[in-house]
Structure formats: structure tokens, C-alpha cells
Image: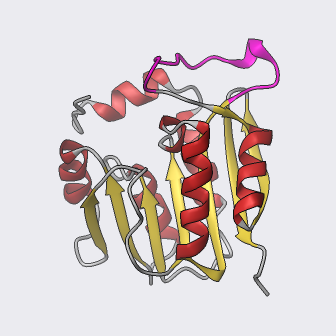
Amino acid sequence: MTWDPNTYPTTIRAEIHHYEELQDQVAQATAGISARTILDLGVGAGETASRVLKMHPAARLIGIDSSTEMLRGAAQRLPQDRVELLQQNLAAPLPDQAFDLAISALAVHHLAGEDKAKLFLDLARHIRHDGYLVIGDVVIPSNPADALIEIEADYDFPSSIDDQLGWMEEAGFLPRVVWVCQDLAVFRAQLSGAK
């Protein structure tokens, strides 16, 4: 799929209800975390990274995305002295370094359930013992009437909140849900070995 970082902001806001609130909630969920190194899973055009970097002015960020077009957009938006951008798929092994915080907005739902579970295990190996994972994404709501976002077969694979909490726990995180709005949710998870 080809993405255009110039039209993406308008398109995503039309497709995702409460988009601004989701982004605000993801950024707010990082409050109080001492983050010097941040990993953004699916950095896109840099919307989430921009908000989170404002909250953590001393942090450096590595953003990964499979789209060269979106990475070009992120490069134009984000501070070059604080950000490194890498082209890779979310299912690929993560960059070989330790992070205080990993974030993601509207990307993890592109992975099937077993691949989400593998990603959470990989994240647990790359996040420092006192680090966090914050994800805002499309979920399968408990009430089918709350499924508002159009799902594209073979591209979108949302999972339930309970399934994702279970996979995070199995990976060693202590997760909780900090915000839910119909078929959108924000998770904040700390490694269980944290002090």
C-alpha cells in the first residue's frame, strides 16, 4: 500500500473517529515516565512522535515504519537532531538497543494476533526493566455496535482488549487500559520486573 504524507493527515482524521483525542491520550499516557530513549512503532508521518517528544524534551527517538513515503514525511516534521528513522516492518526484529519507552498509534492492529504476541515479547527484551509500552489502536469492541472503523480484510487485524492484555502479561508486562472510546483503546504497560 502506498501512503502520501501530504494527504494522510486529512484521510486518517476522516477514517478514525476521535483521532485527535486518541493521539492526546497516547501522549498523555507517557506522562511521568523518565524517557531518554523512545521507540515509535509505525512512526508514520510523525504525529505521535511529535507529541511525545514535546512531553519528553531530553529524549531521543527511533521511529520505524514500512513506508518510505511516510518516513520522508516524518523526516520533514520531526527534529533531525533527536530522531533516527528506519524502514522496516513491525514483524521484523526491533533495533538492537534498550529503550525507556516504546509507543505506537494505529499500527499494531496491522499484525495478526500471534504476531502481536511476538512483538510484545520482542519489546520486553528491548525495553529497560523500568520502562513502559504505550499503545493506542483499533480494537474489537465488546459491543459489536461500537465497531465504527472500517476494517480492510488482509490488512487490518484488530484484537480484543482482553487478548492484548493477555499477550502483554505473557510477555512480562503489567498492562492496563487507560482510555477506551468504542473501538479505540490506549494501553499503558510497565515491565513486571520494574521497581
Q: Is residue 137 magenta?
A: no
Q: Is the magenta stretch mostly helix, strand or loop?
A: loop
The number of numbered badges drawn on the structure is 0
187 lies above or below 184: below
The correct choice, above or below, for 139 with respect to 63 in the image is above
At which x and y percent is residue 158?
60, 31
Q: Residue at x 55, y 36 (%)?
A: 112
**Residue 90 location in percent, x, y?**
41, 51
Q: Specify whether 90 is left or right of 179.
A: left
Where residue 75 appears, as percent x and y from the top left, is: 21, 59
Quadrant housing residue 171: bottom right
What range is drawn magenta here?
Answer: 140-155
Seen from the viewer's position, the closer of residues 144 and 192 is: 192
Q: Residue at x 36, y 69 (%)?
A: 62
Inspect the magenta stretch and tell me whether residue 145 lies in it.
yes
**How is the structure coloured here?**
secondary structure
Which residue occupies the extreme bottom position in the image? 195
From the top left corner, tell me how far across and down residue 110 is, in percent.
48, 36
State the quadrant of the C terminus: bottom right
Residue at image position (81%, 25%) is 142
Where on the picture, by quarter, is residue 119?
bottom right
